[in-house]
Image (tube, rainbow, N blue to C red):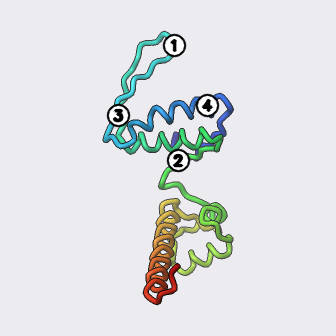
Amino acid sequence: MGAQEILHLPNPDEVEQAKVSSRTLSKYAGVDRVQLTLKVDSQPTEDLILPGHVLQILLEVLSEMSKGNAISLVPHHHELSTQEAANLLNVSRPFLVGLLEQGEIPFRKVGTHRRVLLKDVMAYKERTDQQRKDSLDELTALSQKEGMGY
């Protein structure tokens, strides 16, 4: 598979198969590991043991496929262009470049182009999401304290 991105849009048969498979696998969502038996036509069966977190990823893939959504699997160490990172954060590219230049997200230059690691973009997103949540919690507590709640 390597470090390149994989993208697949499911066809109608795959959507239906994903619905059935995700319902079956969801029964095992909380387990630490699962053993699967693989069978293809008349070939001998093979057993496969998956860690629980891999099963969770598989369930997420099947869930999205069952909705007809395209799936993209990107390694955590994957490098993004500034436009890709901006799209992921739902901000403009110039705003993202400002974040990079302010040191909010690490980056490296390849010639004149900036590259950012997916893991660094996701870490920034998690930080800002948490800050937003903390601010909303504080505002809610303050409004309740002041009797402004409903």
Write down the residue under mark 1.
Answer: 41
Q: Position of residue 109 (x, y in %)?
A: 58, 68
Q: Earlier in the sequence, mark 1 or mark 4?
A: 4
Please state which of the two labelled residues, at mark 1 or mark 2, is closer to the viewer: 1
Q: Please tell me whether mark 4 sits on a helix, a strand or a loop.
A: helix
Residue type at tag 2: Ala
Q: Position of residue 88 (x, y in %)?
A: 61, 61
Q: Answer whether labels 1 and 4 touch (C-beta < 8 Å).
A: no
User: Which circle marks residue 96 in the picture?
Assistant: none
Write down the residue under mark 3.
Answer: 34
Please state which of the two labelled residues, at mark 1 or mark 4, is closer to the viewer: 4
Q: Answer whether labels 4 and 2 touch (C-beta < 8 Å).
A: no
> Mark 3 and mark 1: span between their CA atoms?
23 Å
Vertical order, 14 against 46 (above or below): below
Please state which of the two labelled residues, at mark 3 or mark 2, is closer to the viewer: 3
Write down the residue under mark 4.
Answer: 16
